[in-house]
Structure formats: structure tokens, C-alpha cells
Image (cartoon, grey):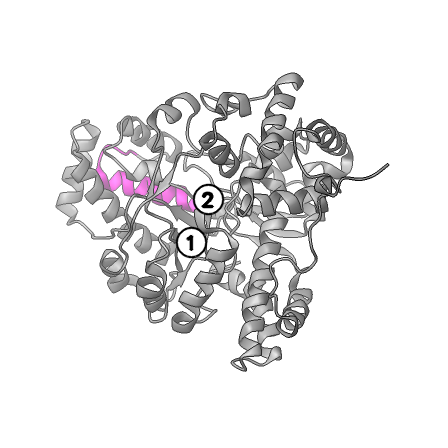
Amino acid sequence: MTVDTRDLLTVHPDRLLPAQPDVRDVARRIYEATKDLPIISPHSHVPPQWLVDDQPFSDPVSLLLSPDHYVLRMLHANGAELSDLGRGPDGPVQLDEAAARKAWRILCENYHLFRGTPVKYWFDTTFAEVFGITQVPSARTADAIYDQIAAAIATPQFRPRALFERFNISVLATTDDPLDDLAGHKALAQDPTFTGRVIPTFRPDRFLELARPGWADLARRLGEVSGVDTGDYAGYIAAIENRRRYFKEHGAVSSDHSHLDAGTEPLSEDEARRIYAAALRGEATVEEGRAFHRHMMSETARMATEDGLVMTLHPAVYRNHDTDNFTRFGPDAGSDIPVKVEFTKALQPLLTRYGNHPNLNLVVFTIDEDVYSRELAPMAGFYRSMHVGVPWWFIDAPEAIRRFRGAVTETAGFYRTSGFIDDTRAFLSIPTRHDMSRRLDAAYLAELVSEHRLTEDEALATAHDLVTTIPQKVFKL
């Protein structure tokens, strides 16, 4: 039988490496030296309960499609209904087999839409290297690919813990609400049959934005969980500090923060108390809420100097831009949109106080590429506590990562950056994303070697540090 080459899925061994043969040879050697190193994932969104329960994944859609906002947004833009892709009012829902196959066919029929995007790169590599799939997704191959994945995930080799070992993950950080009792993390830490390291991350955004609807109830619940009276500002601060300690006792190394801007201007004690009291009465204005969360960013830095948690910032995202989409399908369904951000003036109050503190590691991410060379690299190139976070989310893509290295390295070097962040709910794409980063860094370093700006030995050492030493140091691992 003649095989239609259009149906053959291939991933080239030199993908993302330089086209020039001599430079590519150097890049190959650098990549070979790092490709099998353990994965450090200090910022991710994989539910720890998957590893606690270690149950088989139920179907290809709930594993690869419905939790992944990168995929949902592109299919939605081209006419697909999110309800047909496994999304319900509160996020992903469990579909029966007929509905799951329908969702999978929508993905495969529209696979061409992802050409040129990192999503196709991640999918191609995951399909080929994790599942051994040899067919390009299409209307013609959808059912066969679904069947192959469904058969694989029913086997012990594809349970979460087996994949954790297969992917060679040394550290996996989750993202967790301050009210979380971290039962899953405790269960994993106490399980002698699980040898991996899975740690929580303190994510307090909704507790710091006190003009949001329902915030007074959040403050009450924070008090209940922490055992601290949050009826006044002093109690609220004590409750936040209490939960940070709890998270650190259960393995956390960082707190994560995402507000609309990067402001860090502190309030006077009296003004903070006044706004807090107004918020408890439901009377805080939007402007007061904004001033308070900026104040809390400086307070968070102060707390970090005392308890040692790394502080990561990734502001400037307009959450749930499509309000109808948010109402129907909840958050993380693909309608978050980047906005412009300013860092130099915004971070100055925090950095003036804590920018050179020996116990603060501040990692600043952005989706606004304009600020890399103009703002973030110069600040990280001076302040001892600050590091530039690598591209993530919308710019977690080959061209953006290349631009990042070019924009940041000449001012801040490699060692004032964070190491790669996969920032994903898509568990099976973790090794693919880290491999992409290693290939791109190998290519960038090979270019420096070819221009005689680095020796090959220096490039090899730097590549190793980008994967191991740098993330370990920045995230205090």
C-alpha cells in the first residue's frame, strides 16, 4: 500500500538548531550535553492530586485538550464552541466517549491552524516522542490517533507517577491558594513509594485585591484558616504571614503574584488601616484597591526578606477579557490578553527598600517584550535581588525566546535570568517545553561561539548552568 507522506508525522532531530552547518554542529554538541539533564519546573500548574491518586488519565481530551488554554483560544478564534471542547461553567468537564471523540475530531480537523505556533511544536513532539504517533492529525486520522492515545494511557507506563519518572522531573512546583490545606503535598511527602519532589507555591492574588466583589468573605475565611483575627489590618498581615509559614513548612520556595500593573508604592500605616477597614465594610473604591495591592507588593517583599520565599511577579494581563466567555466557562479558557506595562518607576519603591537585600530573590516576568532591554535587563544588571524571568505564556515561543536572549544577555548576562519556566497545566508537554528551551539556548550559545565571543567550553558550561545551577540558585532549591 502506498503511504501518503502528508499523513506522516515527523520531528526532525535538528529542530530549532541553526541552519548553518558549522554553527549547527556546535549547537548539536551543546544540546547533547544538556538534553538528558533532570527537569526543574519551579512554576507550573499541574494538580498534585494527579500524583497522589496515580490513576490512569481518563481520555485524550481531558489530558491534552480541555485544560490547555493555548489550544482552546486558537480553536475558539476559528469558530469552535468551547462547550464542544470539554469546557463547562467551572472549567474542564468529563465527557462521555462520543463527546470526547467529537472534541478530538475538532482539534484534528483544525490542526493546520496551529502551523507556525509553539502549540504545534509541543503537540508534534508529544505525539511523536511520548506516544509514538506517526500520523499527522487530520479529519482522516482523528479516530486512529484517539484510539492510540486512549490505549496508551490505560497502561501502567502512562500513569502520572510513571510519567513523572520517565520525564526525569527532579522538582515540580504547583500553584496553590492560601486557603489550601496542601493535603496532596503532605500525602506525597509522606509516601515512601514516591521519590519525586513536588512543592506548593503561595499564590495570594485574590486576597490582596480588596476592591473585588466578595473580598470581605475571603478575609474572613483567611482568618479562619490561619487562626488569626482578620478584623483589622494588623490581623490581616499576621494571617498572610501565617499562611506563608505554613506553605514554607510544606516545601514551598516561592510566592507568585499577578496583578494588572507592577506598582509597589507603599502606603502609610494609617492609610493601609483605613482602606482595609473600608474594604471590610464593602466600601473600598477601585482606586483604593489598586493602591492597597501595590502596597502589599512592598509588604510581600518585606515578608520575603524575613521568611526567604522567592517573590515572582508576572503582571500586565487583562484577565477574562471576554466577559461572556468567563461567565459561561470560567477562568483560564483562553480570553486573557496582555497589556502594556511599565516597570522602572513601578518597582523603584520596592527596589529602594529591598533591591539589595541578601534574603530576597525577586523574579520579574513580562509579556511586553519592549521592556526587556529598556527596563528589566538594566535593573537586573544592577540590583542584587532581581532576576529577569524567561519568556512565558504568550511569548513562550521560539522566536520570542531568541529575541529575549538577544535583548537581555548583553546587559544582564545569563546569570541574572531565571532558568526556564514551563508554566503549564498540560503535564505531558513539560518535557517538550523544556527540550525546546534547551535547543534554543544551544542555538544561541553556538552563535556566540561561531562569532568567537565565547569558547565552546564556556558555552557548554553556560548551557549546563541554565538548566541546573541557575534555577536552583534563583528559586533557592
Does 444 sit left or right of 357 as displayed?
Answer: right
Residue plotted at (18% across, 27% down): 281
Say whether residue 457 is left or right of residue 330: right
Sort mark 1 into few (<14), some (14-19) or many (20+) by Cα contacts within 10 Å.
many
Residue 458 percent location from the top left of the image: 58, 78
The N terminus sits in image quarter: top right
Disc 2 crowd rating (10 Å Cα; few below 14, some 14-19, many 20+) is many
Find disc 1 in the rendering and name its residue: 309
Q: Which residues are magenta?
A: 229-247
Quadrant assignment, res 135: top right
Determine which of the numbered discs, if any, sits on residue 247 in the image: 2
- Residue 210, image x, y percentages: 25, 35
Q: Main secondary structure of the magenta part?
A: helix
Queried whether the magenta region covers residue 243, the answer comes back as yes
Give how far across and how far down residue 78 sits, in percent.
Answer: 48, 31
Which of the pair 232/114 is nearer the observer? 114
Residue that sits furthest to the right in the current view:
1
User: Can residue 201 be seen at all in this image of the molecule?
Assistant: yes
Residue 425 seen by the camera: no
Label 2 near label 1: C-beta < 8 Å?
yes
